[in-house]
Image: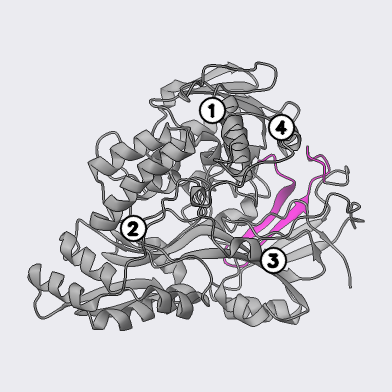
Amino acid sequence: MNILKKNKTTDAHPYVPELKDLYRQGRISRREFLRMTTLLGLSATSAGLFLAGCATQPAAVPAATNAPAAAAATAVPTKAPTQPPPTITRGGHLRVAGAVGRVDHPARFSWLALSQPIRLVAEYLTFTGTDNITRPWLLEKWEASEDVKTWTLYLRKGIKFNNGDELQSADVIKTMQDWFNKEVGSSMLGLMSYLQPTNIEKVDDYTIKLHLDSGQITVPDNLFHYPAQIMHRNFEGDFIKQPIGTGPFTLKEYAESERAVLAARKDYWKNGEDGSPLPYLDQITYIDLGGEETPQVAALQAGTVDVVSEAKTGAYQALKDDPKFQFLIVPNGSCNVMRMRVDQEPWTDVRVRQALKLCQDREKMRSLAFFGLGDLGADFHVSPIHPEYCQKPIPKYDPEKAKALLAEAGHPNGLQVELTVGSDVADNLAMAEALKASAAAGGFDIKLNAIPINSYWNVWTEVPFGVTNWLHRPLGTMLPRLAYSADADGKPVAWNESRWVDKEFSDLLTEAERTLDVEKRRAIFCKMEDIQQERGSVAISFFLASFATGSKKVQNLKAHPSFYNLLDDVWLKEA
């Protein structure tokens, strides 16, 4: 393979010609081609022109993507090219049922719900769309060096914060320095541990260079991690006191546990699909109705809210067949992880962890907790939607083998453990209850400690055994870096809730992060999956799907793989 040839007029990176050849040969799918070429800096226009010029292409090898069978049936449909642009109604007030929790520094977000109203005020350098492809947002473009160790970020010029200041490199660098400040406590520190704060270079007022410790393919994707919102250069650490951002709305009111009121800007930098300035709405209000779905769904049915921020299985059951509402589903890589702290008994013993995994009746758990939707998991944290996914047999429910492992580990009479779970998240609780039932035959007496989800997020890294919902990330390399890695001192990173660090696994992850060839990266993941399945700290029965639901008067509502609310370009159409 020769990746040194580069067409300087069209190809942003030396590997792009190789990707074109792989696509022509049918060895990668259209989506994999778009994802990798845009990640390496090729513009969407150039990538589209190339694809348009390939009149025919051999069918990509099915095993190359292992895309879930449900994907085609549940993905949000796209508009046909010949469809005329919609007639958009400007103005109006959108009401969203969603959490309005305590917010200070957005870099500290460890709960997606807190970021939802804030993302309409403060934006990201990049944007991962509903198609799982990452594109520039506040950035005009980026470029990666041949060894993907140097990334050059080019800001769009003329973007204004809501205080009138222009977005410049100083704002981005200040934001990134906060990410790497241990006192801030951002998960970005672990996610981007390949970058030292001293290696962020200001080239000019609109250009930044990142000099990485090692080659890394996920930089653009990491910049859309939900705590990565860009702050103003003078930000002091409390966004509610200093709500300065580049987004389409300003924060007019923020009453914790009650409501967040957002008012449209008249000078936002981006236009909508009809060419007119965004946003279309005049106001968005987030209304906190608590963590349980029942009052949120009831409010939607009563017409007191228009959208449920993060719809889950309760909303699905109540609304999927109701013609008054729209219900959108998109497959993703999120999952409810049953994680065991390997630094606390009895989970220090790998045999106990293996026994617990054998107690999963995965089909039954998926059916009871998620209505049979999503793909089955095999106790490694990468899903069929990820390009790196290496298909493995789904482990069978084997309580007899589980009992034998417990006896071998010194628990011949079984073992009593406590499982902490969010009581007001229906799929989490249903899955925990299903595990309790199926694990009894394997020698586990599981006591459920069901607490409100808001309380769970206060202790999620501390409980010995818990159910944590991990959101989708665009690349399979991202979650292991967030959840199963260590910092430069060898200590588990902030979000490594299970404290599991495995040198062989970590070395393979580092290798995968700098491997551009998706087939070679998948081969690396085959080894990583075996390691995590055999001696890892998590049980993953199945992967989820993302829902979006609301009144049919809400136009352009979208379901995002990461459950992000994308409301900057919605509008209201009265029935």
- Residue pointed to by mark 4: 50
Asked which quadrant contains residue 546, the reply is bottom right
- Tally of numbered discs: 4
Asked which quadrant contains residue 539, the reply is bottom left
Q: Residues within 10 Å of mark 4 (few under 14, many from 20)?
A: few
Local secondary structure at mark 1: helix
Q: Is residue 554 above or below residue 490?
A: below
Amino acid, disc 4:
Phe
Amino acid, disc 1:
Ile
Distance CA(mark 1)–CA(mark 2): 29 Å
Nearer to us in this view, 220 or 408:
408
Q: Earlier in the sequence, mark 4 or mark 3?
A: 4
- Residue pointed to by mark 3: 96
Q: Earlier in the sequence, mark 4 or mark 1?
A: 4
- Point out which mark residue 461 bears: 2
Amino acid, disc 2:
Thr
Nearer to us in this view, 308 or 109:
308
* Residue range highlighted in magenta: 245-272
- In percent of width and height, residue 267 lies at 82, 39
Callout 1 touching callout 2 (CB < 8 Å): no
Local secondary structure at mark 3: strand
